[in-house]
Amino acid sequence: MGERTKRPQKPIPAIQSMIVDTMGGRVQVSWDKESAATPFGQLVFFAEFQKVSGLFDAWVEDCPLIYNSPNAPKKRDVLGTWDLSILAGHRRYAHVTALRSDGVSPQILGMSKIVSEDALRRALGKIPEAEGTEWMRKHLFKSVAAACHTPWILDIDTTIKTLFGHQQGAEVGCNPHKPGRPSHAYHAYWVGNLRLLLDVEVTAGNTTASNHAQPGLNRVLDTLSAEQRPYLVRGDCGFGNDAVIREMEARQQSYLFKLRQSPRVKRLLQREFTRRDWVNAGQGWEGREDTIQLAGWQQSRRVVILRRLLKGHLIATQEHQGQLEFAFVDRRQTKVYEYAVLVTDIQEGILSIAQLYRDRADAENGFDELKNQWGWGGYTTRDLARCRLSARAVGLVYNWWSWYSRLAFPESRREAITSRPLLLSAIGRSTKHAGQTHLFLTPMHAAQKKVERGIENIRRGLRIVRETAEQFLEHQPWDLLVSYIVAQITRSPWSPPGTFPALAGP
């Protein structure tokens, strides 16, 4: 039998337009595949911020990614795609596909194209782990170093990233949200008050204890110069142990930690609760100070005991012979307190120490924002190395955006859930004529006056910093920009030569 000849297929005609019946009437719809448009029209202002500061260009230049193939994507295209994906609030590499038809953002970031999700994943896998770690640590520190010349507080805490696959380091540990589910542990080191990330260590899910976070804390402190050291290192009861405290004392670093309810701490509470000379500690708390030497401690240390009377109707329960018994607490005859014991070596008063520790709760807001509004809950790969790279990259873009949003609105700190719609989202259509690019922005936010005011603040600050950098050649534009932003936050006069106004601190 001879070969069967294939019948030529008729070309499928392209759809030019469609008539769509809607509740508001018939609408004529057609695809416009030639125009260059973007849903992130206001990215152009953030790109100007990155250009003036020099942060993005330096990050791309220092990247240890090396390709041998001439057909490989450019390093700037890879990192620009990564930057844009994180900035858009993506949580998975697959979300990069939603950016592939953006015809405006690549030009704004100096890219030739947006790479695919597979190209991005493979590129991150080609970065050597040791070199990639040092690269990301360097630029994370650079994004906050200029703000460390005034008294500030280093917060340390740990959070859990729940995993649902077969990833390296996915171990069952302390997972309060999904008990029994494997996870990764994120040990984060924060610039308190400003809520900026210094570094993050991603480890297996069963390594949530403080001894796994302590090496990273020691490395962060050793990286800082004497002028950049924090006024205080602050942490919860997981870090109030002798090993961490001795490391702080060896470095002559002040600390404030909470103690666990050990037997000796409970005996101290029994002794102190009979005293009458408790002093006001703010927000309904009372305080006293004393010294204690726990088992295993080589010396006694100062502690501040805090207590607060519980209000409302209380019920006490007790299990007796398999039955749960209830007893109503008569607050006229019985007083029930919640308490905390803090260990510290600073000489502040009880009221100041209590308020300093209460301020530590702001670190939880940073975790919530990075996990639920940025990409800390995603960008998961089978290997732990790329998970660590992604965690630091998300933190880096988060720091850049935090500075940018404070430049726009210095009177308050806005999380990404409100600042992205204000400062990023707008329909942008680009046209080119006579070698010039014209970007038309269509605002989509109802608070357009607020958006315009924020953009005006950004452009005014960048213009002042750009003009000042030309006069003070010994200062880097980024350092000048940070000093300008801090001056706007504290509403103090800006001093370009490098004297930074005080931040909200002790």
Image: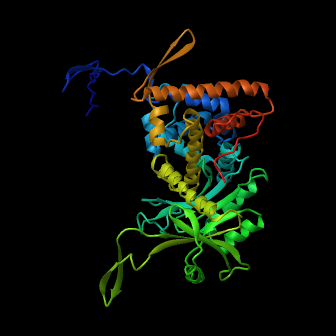
User: 294 left or right of 160?
Assistant: right
- Is 142 in front, or is 28? 142
Q: Is residue 139 above or below residue 466?
A: below
- Across and down, in percent, residue 13 comes to 28, 20
Question: Can I make out residue 271 in this image?
Answer: yes
**Residue 178: x percent and y percent?**
40, 64
Which residue is pictured at 50% across the width and 52% down the height?
365
Q: In the current view of this chain or complex, which residue is farthest to the top?
A: 434
Quick check: 183 above or below 262? above
Q: Is residue 110 visible?
A: no
Which colour assignment does the render follow?
rainbow
Q: Quadrant of the C terminus?
A: bottom right
Quick one: 444 or 431, which is closer to the camera?
A: 444
Left or right of 6 on screen, residue 413? right
Position of the N terminus, as image quadrant, is top left
User: Quick check: 158 left or right of 417?
Assistant: right
Q: Is residue 391 above or below residue 16?
A: below
Q: Position of residue 140 (x, y in %)?
A: 65, 46
Q: Nearer the viewer, residue 10 or 360?
A: 360
Query: Residue, x 72% and y 40% (percent of image)?
Result: 500
Q: Left or right of 412: which side holds 353?
A: right
Which residue is at a point 75% across and 68% down the rendered structure image?
249
Q: What residue appears at the point 67 percent right and 52 percent down from the top-left corner?
A: 152
Q: Residue furthest bottom?
A: 321
Residue in the foreground of this view, choosing between 103 and 236: 236
Figure quadrant of residue 264: bottom right
